[in-house]
Image: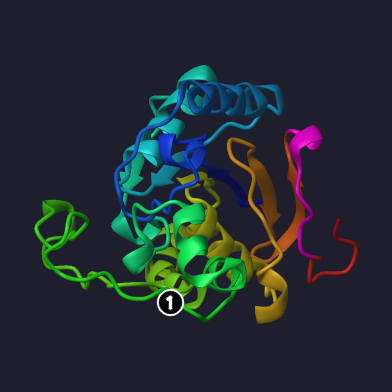
């Protein structure tokens, strides 16, 4: 049966500083590295033999995948990277701290931008410090100026449907190492989560989410490998799920 492991990258330097990171290529903290290694220990302890890994093109996700796979003695499996698995683009909030933005617009507006399903932050102005148009990782790609979770899902879905899902349908055991919002987008799609419910779903850093799938790629079971750091999961749409 197809097996999927979703892994949010370990703590990054800007996670620690409570900055809106988005597409900025920020590395892991020492604690984030430890989370990634711990994820590998959990994968090994659960006896999960992976066939393939997918990651974003951002260092924090790639290094999380590498550290976890190395610890699980599976660093040799293919690792494919795509910008479509990047974190949500935070537009004009990029690089700013939550506190700075809240001081300008208020906590309620910050929460709306952070947690709503379809309200994006103001767009990123072209030509600034975090303008990604000259980054060759995105050459020829439709770079957004801002994203909501809804548009993040729209960006992730072509890669899911065209690349990841076919590998799962072929029976492969797949690890996706990505980001809080790109993984929330996958969870919304897989579990058919309502728009007003996905806003309350949180993906913890460095805690592998193991999802068993049927032949139609519908979840039949799901659990975090580290139960002590688990977050609530959406209900499965199949009878007998847990």
Q: Quadrant of the C terminus?
A: bottom right
Q: Which residue is at 63% across, 51% downward? A: 203
Residue 203 among those drawn in magenta: no
Q: Which residue is at 44% across, 64% downward? A: 160
Q: Is residue 39 left or right of residue 123?
A: right
Image coordinates of residue 66 in percent, x first then y, are 41, 28
Q: Which residue is at 72% across, 73% downward? A: 197
- Quick check: can you spot residue 89? no
Secondary element at tag 1: helix
User: In which quarter of the view is residue 83 placed?
Assistant: bottom left
| Residues rendered magenta in the picture | 226-234
Q: Is residue 170 left or right of residue 108?
A: left
Residue found at the far right of this picture? 240
- Quick check: can you spot residue 234? yes
Q: Which residue is at 9% across, 58% downward? A: 134
Up/down of 123 relative to 114, above or below: below
User: In which quarter of the view is residue 207 placed?
Assistant: top right
Give the dominant element type of the magenta stretch: helix, strand or loop.
loop
Image coordinates of residue 189 in percent, x first then y, are 59, 71
Up/down of 41 relative to 49, above or below: above
Residue found at the far front of this picture? 103
| Residue of label 1 | 151
Q: Nearer the viewer, residue 71 or 231?
A: 231
């Amino acid at each position: 049966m197809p097996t999927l492991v979703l892994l949010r990258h370990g703590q990054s330097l800007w996670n620690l500083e409570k900055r809106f990171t988005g597409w900025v290529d920020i590395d892991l903290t020492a604690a984030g590295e430890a989370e990634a290694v711990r994820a590998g220990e959990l994968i090994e302890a659960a006896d999960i033999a992976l066939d393939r890994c997918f990651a974003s093109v951002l260092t924090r996700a790639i290094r999380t995948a590498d550290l976890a796979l190395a610890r699980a003695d599976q660093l040799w499996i293919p690792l494919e990277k795509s910008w479509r698995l990047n974190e949500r683009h935070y537009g004009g909030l990029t690089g700013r701290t939550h506190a700075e933005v809240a001081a300008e617009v208020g906590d309620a507006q910050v929460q709306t931008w952070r947690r709503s399903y379809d309200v994006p932050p103001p767009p990123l102005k072209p030509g600034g410090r975090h303008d990604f148009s000259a980054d060759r990782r995105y050459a020829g790609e439709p770079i957004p100026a801002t994203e909501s979770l809804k548009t993040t899902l729209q960006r992730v879905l072509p890669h899911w449907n065209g690349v990841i899902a076919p590998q799962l349908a072929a029976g492969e055991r797949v690890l996706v190492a990505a980001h809080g919002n790109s993984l929330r987008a996958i969870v919304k799609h897989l579990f058919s989560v309502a728009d007003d419910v996905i806003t309350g779903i949180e993906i913890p850093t460095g805690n592998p989410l193991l999802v068993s799938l049927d032949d139609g790629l519908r979840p039949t079971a799901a659990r975090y490998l580290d139960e002590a750091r688990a977050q609530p999961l959406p209900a499965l749409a199949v009878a007998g799920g847990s």
